[in-house]
Amino acid sequence: MPNLYLIAVIAGTEVAIRSDCIESVVTIGDVIEIPKCDPMVAGLMALRSRVLTLIDCQYAVSGQSQRISPRSHAVIVEISGHNYAFSVDAVRDVVSVDDDAIKPVTRLDSRWSSISVEIAEIEDRALMVISPELLLASRLEMAA
Amino acid sequence: MDDLREEFIAETRETLEILSEQLVLWEKTPDDHSLVDSVFRFVHTVKGSCGFLDLPRLLKLSHAAEEVLSAARDGDLAPTTDLVTAVLLVIDRISELTDALETGASVRDNDAALISAMLAFLPNQDGVAALQDHAVTTEPLLLADAEPDDSFLRNRGRTVRVSLSVLDQLMSGISDLVLSRNEVSRQLRRLNDASDVEHAFGRLSSSVAEMRDAIGQMRLQSIERLFSTLPRALRDISVELDKHIDLTIEGNEVEIDREMAEAMRDPLTHILRNAADHGIESAAERFASGKPATGRIHVLARQSGNQILVEISDDGRGIDVEKLAAKAIERKLYTSAQWQKLSERAKLEAIFHPGLSTADTISAISGRGVGMDVVRNNIHAIGGTIDLDTVPGRGLKVTLRLPLTLSIIAGLSVIAGDQSFGIPRSSIVEILSINNRNVVIENIGGMPVAKVRGQRFAYAMLEDVLGIDLPENLTEVSRTLIIIRPAVGAVFALNVAAVIDNEELVVKPGAPLVMAAGLYAGTTLPDNGRPMLLLDASGLAEALGAQEQLFTEAESDVVPVGAELLQQAATALLFESTEGISRAIRLSVVDRMEEVESDQVHYVGGRCCISVEGQLYDVHGLNRLRPLEAIKLLRISDGQQATYLAVNDVMDIFAIPSEIAPSAEPEAFEGIVHFNGTPVELVNPYRFFEMETQDGSLNAARPVCYLETGTDDNWERRILQPLLTASGYHVSYDEADRNSAAVILSSADRAATVVDDRMLVLRETVHAVEDQVASIYRYDRSALMSAIESKLAGAR
C-alpha cells in the first residue's frame, strides 16, 4: 500500500517523514527562547492561537544548533497532546512510497540510529525515514 | 452513589442504542459470533452494575437475558425472529427502567411475563424455575407495553455525551474570546467618550465570563470520582499479598479536569500498587522494625495555585538506593563511577528507567519493571511532574504535580533580560522596589539573602536563575523585587528587571522536554501574539535552594504592598473608580489590592460587604453587583480597622505634589492634585471609617432574631435560619436572648396572642386564616423580610 512521504533536509541530509503524522509545514516566525531548557528545544513559536515547541532537528542529529532564520521551514506534528514544530533546512517534495519500499534499517551512524529505524527506497535512492516521535522519545529517555 | 448511578444511566442508555442494532444484525447473520458476544458482554455488564447499585428489577431482567444469550453463544439456541423479539422486549424494558431511574417514574411490573417469554426458548429448562420466582402473569405480550411514555422524555434531566475534543475546542475558543475581550477593553480605555460602547461591552464581558464558567464546569469533576476506586483496588491487592493496609484519603473535594482524571487513573493505581507491594513490608518485617503491623497509605489531593498536587505516601521501607544502584549497574545503565557522581535525586529517579525495579521477586502485581517509567510518561503526557521523596525504612512519598489544563489564571508578566515571563499572581506575596529602604540584600555564607522588613528570604536575580545575560546598565536601572510563595518550598525573593501588565493568561501545559527544565509551569499566548513561558514558583524555589527549613518565617506574614513607600515622600495610588473616573488615594492607607469574584461580595443591610477570613468588611464604591465578574478591591486600613474600596482598575503610583488644591467636598475628597498635568481628586480616607462600628466588623452589629420554637424546630433550623443568617441577622434559639432580640419570630399555632410588638407570627398556609393574630405566610420571602426590617426600624 502506498503512503505519502515528505522529503525534507535535516543537517544537510535528505530524509523522509511519513506524511500522515504531519499536520502542516510552515515558515518559522518569531521564536521565543526557553532558558535552561534542553538544547534540542529551540524555543516556542505561535501558530494562530496555539503555542508550538520548536525542536531543532539538526541538533538532534549533529549536536550543532541550527541557525534558525525567519524563512526556515518547520514541520508541525502533534505528539501525545502537545504541538511541536520540527525545524528542517528545507522541504523538497512529497512522494508516494509503497510499503514494499520501506526496509528496516541496517546500519546507521549512532546519532541517526536513535531517531530512524527504517529506510525508504525512492527511485534509486535510499532515504532514512525519520520518526518525530522517536526523535523526542530518544531525547526524553536520555534526559531521564 | 448518585454519580455512579448517573454514570450507569448514561452508559447503559448509550450502549442500549447500539445493542438493539446489533441484535437485529445478529438475527440476520446468526453465524456472526462477535455480535452475540458483544450483546452478551453488554448484558453482563448491566447485570454486574445492577447488582452493585442494588437495582433488583434490572438485575432480574439482565440475568435472564444473559442466560438466554449465553445459550445462544454456546450454539444451543438459534436466533429466530421470536427469540430476538423476546430479547428485544427485555432490552426495551431495561431501557425503560433506566429512564425511570432518572425520572423517578414507575414502570408497570410485568417483568416476569417478559422473562418467561424469553426463557421459553431455552432448550434446557432447569434454571428457569429459579428465575421465575414471580407468579407468571398471563398478560398478553404486546410491543406497545414496551413503548416508553412520552411524558418521561419531557421531565428527564437530559444529558448528551460530548467528545472531549469538542469540549477542548469550546474551551480554546472561549480562551481566545477572553483574550480578545481583554484587547477590546484596553482599546476602549483609550477612547474618551465611549459610554454607549462600554455599556454594550459590559454585557459582552459578563456573558463571556458566564460562558467561560459554564465550559470550565463541563470539564471539571471532583477528584472523588477518581479516588473512589482506590479503596477497592487496594483491597484486592492487599488480599492477594496478604498484607493489612489502611488507606486514608484526603482532599476529595478538589476539582480536576475530567480528562486529567482519566489520564491519572492508571498511574495512580500503579503507584498505589507499588506502595502496597514494594513499600509496605510484611507484617513480620514491620513488627521487627518496630512499626505497627498494619501498613498505612495516605492519598492527598490539594489545589495550589495553578497546580493540583496529589501525594501518595506510605510508611513502608522506602526506596533502597543501594539496591537500585546494584540493579542499575548490573543492567549497565550506569558505571559505578557515573553512579557515584549522580545527585541523590538523580539516583532516585533511576527508578523511572524502563525495566528497572528493586523488587527481588516478580509478583503478579508489580515488580515487572514496566511500571514507573510508564507512570512517569503518563504524567508527563498531561503536563505534570512526578517527584519522589524517600526516607529509607520510613516510607516513600510520591508527589504528582498536575496543571489545570487549559486553565485561565490571573498572572503578571515579569521581565528578565529582554524576555518576559508569566507568573501566577496567586503565588505573589508582595512587589516592591529594590531601592526601597526596607530591602537589604545581604550575603550569608556565600548565599545572597534579601531582608525585607526584618524577614529574610532566599534571593536571586531571575536572569541568574535562568542563565540569561544581565543588562549592562544594571546599577542605573531601578529593578523590582517580588516576594513569591511557592506551593512547595519556602517563600523567596526574586529580583526582576520589571513587572508589567496584569492579565488573564490562558495556560497550557508545556511539552515534556520543556517541563523537564523544572522551571516552567506551562506556556501561554498573550495578546501580543508572542508565546510566553509561565514560571513555576516551586521550581524557582528549588533552583534557588529555598528549602523549607532554611529560613524561619513568621506566621502572619502577609506583608502590605506599598507600605514601604510611605516612609519616603507621600505617594498616591491612581485608580479608576467604579464610576469610571480617575481618582487618587494616599498609598499609606492602602494595604493591598485583592481581586474577588462578585459572588464573594454580598449586599446586606443596605450596603455591600465582603467576608474575609470570617470577618465582614464594608465595600465602598459598589452600588450594584454585577454577576460573574471579578471585582478589584483596595483594602484600606487606618491601622486597626479595615474596609474595602471597589475600583475598576489600578493605574499608577505617583508622588503627591506639595501643592494640594482644596476640594469643594472636603468630606469626600481631601483635595485636588495634579498627575501628569491632569487634576485628579484625592480621596479622603476618613469617610470610609467614620461610619464603622468600634470593632470594625459588622458581626457585633448584627440584629438578633430570636426564634420561638417548640420541640419540632426542623423548619426553623433548616429553612428559616439560613435565610436570616444570609440576610445579615444573628439567629438565636436561646430564651436568654429573647429580651435583647430585635425581632421575635414565632409560628401561628404557638403564638396565641401577640404580647410583644417585636413579635412576628408565621403561618403555614398561603391564605390568611381567621385568627386573632395577624400572620405572614412563611414562604412569602419578601413580605417576611420587609416585616422584619420594619420591626427593626421600629425597635430603633
Image (spheres, rainbow, N blue to C red):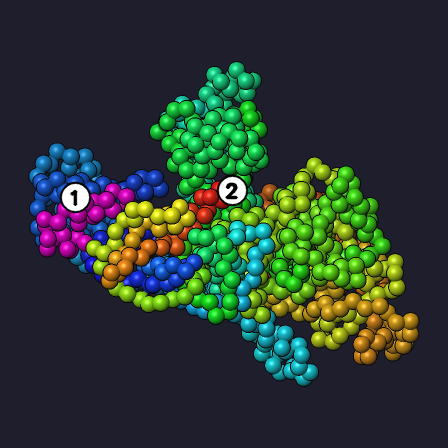
Chain letter for mark 1, please. Answer: B
| Residues in magenta, as a range | B22-46
* Residue type highlighted by circle 1: Leu
Earlier in the chain: of badge 2 and badge 1, it is: 1
Q: Is residue B422 left or right of residue A51?
A: right
Position of residue B550 in the picture relative to residue B767 (left or right): right
Name the secondary structure under disc 2: strand
Q: Which residue is drawn at 57% across and 33% down?
A: B341
Q: Name the residue under label 2.
A: B386
User: Toward which corner of the image does residue B764 lie, by quadrant?
Assistant: bottom right
Q: Are marks 2 and 1 on the same chain?
A: yes
Secondary structure of the residue carrying tag 1 is: helix
The quarter of the picture where the N terminus of chain B appears is top left
- Depth check, mark 2 against mark 1: the one in front is 2
Please identify the quadrant where the C terminus of chain B is shown. Answer: bottom right
Q: Are marks 2 and 1 in contact (CB under 8 Å)?
A: no
* Residue B684 seen in the current view: no
- Residue B39 lies within the magenta run: yes
Q: Where is residue A43 in the image (x, y as percent from the top left)?
A: 53, 59
Please name whichever residue, B480 or B83, is drawn nearer the observer in this view of the structure: B480
